[in-house]
């Protein structure tokens, strides 16, 4: 993916002596010391990150962390004290007012927490307002606004007034106003913060559904870690004006950068963060027509597995466990047992995006879970112990004291011996 937005070493200091405060900050003085000695307030310290085209990049932090200051610098509402903010080849931090106006008109739209709808205008007129101030003719802007309202499910409310709509519906109008301008980058500053929890979750789901179609570059600001983990392709966590960690939801929950981040993620439902893909590994298989129970046992021993999937060509016929194969082999003496005689045909399948919370039940069967693609082809396997280890945040320890289980799909999990 191409980088759409690049932020490099951005600082923002509020006050009439920013250069002095910047020198002190860069020489190691604290934000508190600078405020005390100079009266200058450090808003953002040395922020650097890239946002790829089409991704949702979430900036998360508590009140006063600098996240809202940062997002307002991205579209030039606040000018940084130093650093670069590059949208394609244009530097928002240093460009002239004419160029900044063009960038705002052509590339960026913003959705705020407070809907800022005009009570005397219709929903259609509110959605079209951004196009109106850009000078788009009435017929054209109304057509684009109607399309945006349709995208957010409000086309039938076009002639209503904001007072006729619920809070969640009003926020949809704010989102439609942003979408109507067809921006390349959508800045969303705590857009769902004023909504009730149930409506907020609905809006989060709607945004994710819309993004699958629109594929906008979105910078989303929030103080809610659960919201950040749900929405963000990448997440930047801020504290005291600094970005303390950037990563995926899985990165941040698995490996918090410091005690501050660790405290945030301590009570997170890991089952809603990690997916089957996180713990999946390559499947060990045998063929129904040509292999036997003995072949399956040897494969499991070589691969350090408790069970293997049995394939009938490219289709999954079932699964066989080491215990069953060994018992059948003992009962039949020297005769190698056909796989059909030990085949378990009831097994669970999933796709790579399934959350681990939804795999707890299938994993409780003790059988591996087949990970399949859209064509129902076997592309990997999730071992039950991998699910439980990730949900408990504790590694599986084998008899020799090692911890072979890993989110790296190339690492084997320990197989039990019969």
Image (cartoon, rainbow, N blue to C red):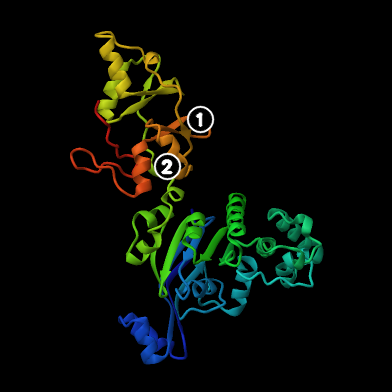
Q: Quadrant of residue 184?
A: bottom right
- On screen, residue 263 above or below 93: above
Estimate the x, y position of residue 63 in percent, counting from the top left. 48, 73
Seen as rendered, the residue at the extreme left is 400
Estimate the x, y position of residue 311 in percent, counting from the top left. 42, 22
Q: Residue at coordinates 46% horizontally, 31% vertically from top-left?
A: 348
In-image side of 317 versus 412 (left or right): right
Q: Quadrant of the C terminus?
A: top left
Look at mark 1 in the image and give the residue it sits on.
376
Q: Secondary structure at mark 1?
A: loop
Label placed on residue 185: none
**Along the line of sight, the residue nearer the viewer: 84 or 179:** 179
In-image side of 17 versus 221 (left or right): left
In-image side of 252 versus 355 (left or right): left
Look at mark 2 in the image and give the residue it sits on.
277
Q: Residue at coordinates 64% horizontally, 66% vertically from top-left?
A: 106
Q: Quadrant of residue 178?
A: bottom right
Q: Secondary structure at mark 2?
A: helix
Estimate the x, y position of residue 76 in percent, counting from the top left. 56, 75
Q: CA distance from mark 1 to mark 2?
A: 16 Å
Q: Quadrant of residue 202?
A: bottom right
Q: Residue at coordinates 76% horizontally, 68% vertically from top-left?
A: 163
In-image side of 252 versus 27 (left or right): right
- Binning the other alpha carbons within 10 Å of mark 1 as few (below 14), some (14 to 19) or many (20 upward) gives some
- On screen, residue 160 above or below 290: below
- Binning the other alpha carbons within 10 Å of mark 2 as few (below 14), some (14 to 19) or many (20 upward) gives many
């Amino acid at each position: 993916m191409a980088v759409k937005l690049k932020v490099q070493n951005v600082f923002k200091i509020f006050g009439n002596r920013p250069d002095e405060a910047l020198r002190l900050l860069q020489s190691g003085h604290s934000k508190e010391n600078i405020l005390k000695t100079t009266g200058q307030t450090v808003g953002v310290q040395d922020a650097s990150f890239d946002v790829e085209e089409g991704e949702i990049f979430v900036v998360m932090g508590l009140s006063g962390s600098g996240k809202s200051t940062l997002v307002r610098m991205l579209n030039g509402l606040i000018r940084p004290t130093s650093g670069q903010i590059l949208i394609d080849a244009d530097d928002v931090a240093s460009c002239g007012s004419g160029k900044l106006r063009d960038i705002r008109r052509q590339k960026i739209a913003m959705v705020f927490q407070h809907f800022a709808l005009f009570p005397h205008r219709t929903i259609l007129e509110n959605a079209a307002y951004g196009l109106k101030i850009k000078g788009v003719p009435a017929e054209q802007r109304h057509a684009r606004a109607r399309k945006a309202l349709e995208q957010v499910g409000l086309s039938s409310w076009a002639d209503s007034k904001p007072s006729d709509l619920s809070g969640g519906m009003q926020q949809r109008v704010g989102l439609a106003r942003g979408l109507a301008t067809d921006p390349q980058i959508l800045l969303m500053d705590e857009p769902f913060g004023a909504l009730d929890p149930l409506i907020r979750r609905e809006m989060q789901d709607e945004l994710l559904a819309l993004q699958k179609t629109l594929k906008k570059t979105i910078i989303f600001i929030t103080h809610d870690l659960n919201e950040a983990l749900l929405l963000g392709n990448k997440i930047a966590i801020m504290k005291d004006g600094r970005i303390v960690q950037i990563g995926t939801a899985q990165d941040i929950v698995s490996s918090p950068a410091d005690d501050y981040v660790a405290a945030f993620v301590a009570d997170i439902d890991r089952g809603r963060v990690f997916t089957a893909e996180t713990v999946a590994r390559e499947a060990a298989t045998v063929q129904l027509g040509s292999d036997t129970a003995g072949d399956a046992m040897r494969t499991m021993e070589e691969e350090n597995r408790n069970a293997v999937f049995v394939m009938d060509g490219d289709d999954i016929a079932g699964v066989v466990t080491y215990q069953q194969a060994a018992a059948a082999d003992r009962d039949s003496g020297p005769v190698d047992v056909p796989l059909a005689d030990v085949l378990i045909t009831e097994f669970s399948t999933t796709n790579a995006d399934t959350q681990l919370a939804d795999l707890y039940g299938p994993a409780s069967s003790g059988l591996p879970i087949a990970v399949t693609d859209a064509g129902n082809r076997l592309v990997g396997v999730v071992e039950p112990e991998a699910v439980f280890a990730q949900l408990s945040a504790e590694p599986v320890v084998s008899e020799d004291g090692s911890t072979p289980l890993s989110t790296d799909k190339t690492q084997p999990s320990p197989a039990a011996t019969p």
